[in-house]
Amino acid sequence: MEPKPKTTHKHTQNISWGDCDPARIAYTGRLPWFALDAINSWWESRLEGDGWFQMEIDRNVGTPFVRLEMDFVSPVTPRHELVCHVWPVHLGKTSVAFRVDGEQDGKLCFSTRTVSVFIVADTFTKQPPPEELRTIIERELLANQS
């Protein structure tokens, strides 16, 4: 996977007892949820508070996932805040890929790579990324190359 750039969007999540399984670590099924919540936070931070809900409802732009990869490195527990570092790693003609690294107490716990396709939400038809979104993603990709 791509190395983490110096600057990433950081999304924090408190891990609670209810997120855990009988082994007293975060239930495996919650980890993708944490990563997806972090990507939604990335969108909100770039679109003046608009995340996936507003993109879908107000902008008529959907981004359904077509791929989700996750590497597990260390258990996530309620002992420390989970910090998810989010950044785009690729922009295609109709898709965008994000990387999310989840860390606790400075230690990598998981790394996720997702791919989403841009669609016209009300017709569920593939489209290129709208210009505003393309500009935001391209700017970040360029900044992360240095």
Image (tube, rainbow, N blue to C red):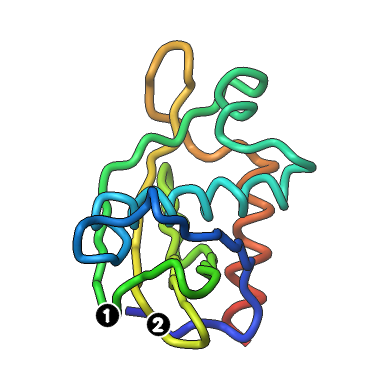
Task: Return the residue at label 2.
Answer: 108
- The answer to which of 127 and 46 lies nearer the viewer is 46
Neighbour class for label 2 at 10 Å: few (<14), some, many (≥20)?
A: some
- State the quadrant of the N terminus: bottom left
**Quadrant (top left/top right/bottom left/bottom right) for the C terminus:** bottom right
The residue that appears at 42% across and 42% down in the rendered structure is 94
The kind of residue on which mark 2 rests is: Leu
Q: Which mark is drawn over residue 73?
A: 1
Residue 65 picture quarter? top left
Disc 1 residue type? Val
What residue is drawn where x is 68% and y is 45%?
Answer: 44
Which type of secondary structure does the marked residue at label 1 adopt?
Answer: loop
- Label 1 and label 2: CA atoms lie apart by 7 Å
Residue drawn where x is 65% and y is 41% of the image: 131
Residue depicted at 44% across the width and 36% down the height: 63
The vertical placement of 84 against 128, above or below, is below
How far across and how far down the image is residue 30, in percent?
Answer: 33, 51
Question: Furthest residue to the left?
Answer: 22
Please say if 53 is above or below 114: above
Out of 29 and 86, give the one closest to the viewer: 29
Asked whether disc 1 touches disc 2, contact meaning CB atoms under 8 Å apart, the reply is: yes
Q: Nearer the viewer, residue 2 or 126?
A: 2
Residue farthest along the right direction in this orientation: 48
Q: Residue 26 placed where, x, y %?
A: 32, 61
Residue 19's mark?
none
Q: Height in image: 50 above or below 99?
A: above
User: Residue 131 or 117: which is nearer the viewer?
Assistant: 117
Circle 2: element type? strand
